[in-house]
Image (tube, rainbow, N blue to C red):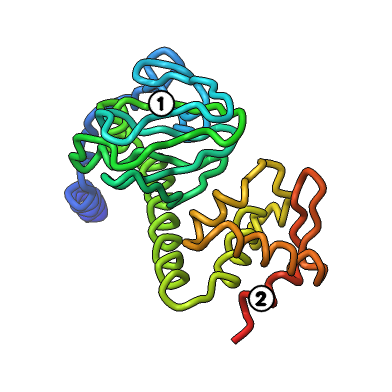
Amino acid sequence: MAKPVAREVAHLATRATPRATPRAPERATPRVTARNAAPARAVFDPKAFLATVSQGRTVARYRKGDLIFQQEDPADAVFYLQKGKIKIVVASKQGKEAVIAILGADEFLGEGCLIGQPLRLATAMAMSDSEVMRVGKAEMIRVLHAEPAFGELFIAHLLTRNSRIEEDLVDQLFNSSEKRLARTLLMLANFGKEEGPKPITTKISQETLAEIIGTTRPRVSFFMNKFRKLGFITYNGTIQIHSSLLSVVLRE
């Protein structure tokens, strides 16, 4: 009797053991090699773009008094000031002129062409030896669409320029010519910027200062002498602005 029982147990054990399901062969993961890897896209550098000549971009050097562009010239490019100082001048039909801005290194000008402005609304003139990058309108539009880093740089410029224009308007409406002159001198000396105040090495005539702040040259002369006597400024070829000049702007 023992043999039939043993055979039955062995038969049940065989039935209970599941058969192994054959596994599908694994697909080999393709190896990424230097040959088939996608080339990494070079990081776009806005400063390098604005420093190198290429298609749609040229650099020109200007001496003091040279025109970068003139009022009513075709507006077909944006300009970037690499080095120097430029003043923006508007002339009326009656022949009166006013300086509406003084621009320094790393600033744009002539951006009105990007909003369909057909002609220049002002004249840009070099106040010292300057280097200017000209970026054609088509190239400027292309890089603004293609490179977010450049778009951020340009938008920051526009916002800063807009804020400055608003401050200039408030200055003209509510402040005295003395305060307006003090503020203009502080701005020309880069007061409040990261690099700190610097001497005003570009020669700016009292007539030009009068045009900027909307007063007469004798008034500018009077206040410049007053600032010097009070120790707010010193000048001997260059104008050195001291932080004490800020008290004129803050004074009620």
Rendering coords of residue 37 (x, y %): 39, 21
For image coordinates 58% across by 57% down, the residue present is: 217
For image coordinates 21% across by 47% down, the residue present is: 18
- Count residues near mark 2 (Cα–Cα under 10 Å), then give few for <14, some for 14-19, many for 20+: some
Q: Quadrant of the N terminus?
A: bottom left
Which image quadrant is residue 35 in?
Answer: top left
Residue 202 vs residue 144, the one in the foreground? 202
- As displayed, is residue 173 above or below residue 18? below
Q: In this figure, what is the number of numbered marks?
A: 2
Residue 59 vs residue 227, the one in the foreground? 227
For image coordinates 58% across by 60% down, the residue present is: 184
- In the picture of the structure, the residue carrying the numbered disc 1 is 134
Residue 26 in sight from this viewpoint:
no
Rendering coords of residue 104 (x, y %): 56, 43
User: Mark 1 belongs to which amino acid?
Assistant: Arg
Residue lying furthest top: 35
Residue 58 lies left or right of residue 228; in this view the side is: left
- As displayed, is residue 239 above or below residue 166? above
User: Mark 2 belongs to which amino acid?
Assistant: Val
Residue 21 lies left or right of residue 94; in this view the side is: left
Dot in front, 2 or 1: 2
Rendering coords of residue 106 (x, y %): 53, 40
Give me the disc on residue 191: none
Q: Secondary structure at mark 1?
A: strand
For image coordinates 30% across by 47% down, the residue present is: 92
Q: Secondary structure at mark 2?
A: helix
Residue 111 in sight from this viewpoint:
yes
For the residues labelled 2 and 1, the Cα–Cα distance comes to: 39 Å
Residue 231 lies left or right of residue 83; in this view the side is: right
- In the picture of the structure, the residue carrying the numbered disc 2 is 248
Which image quadrant is residue 148 in?
Answer: top left
- As displayed, is residue 193 above or below residue 84? below
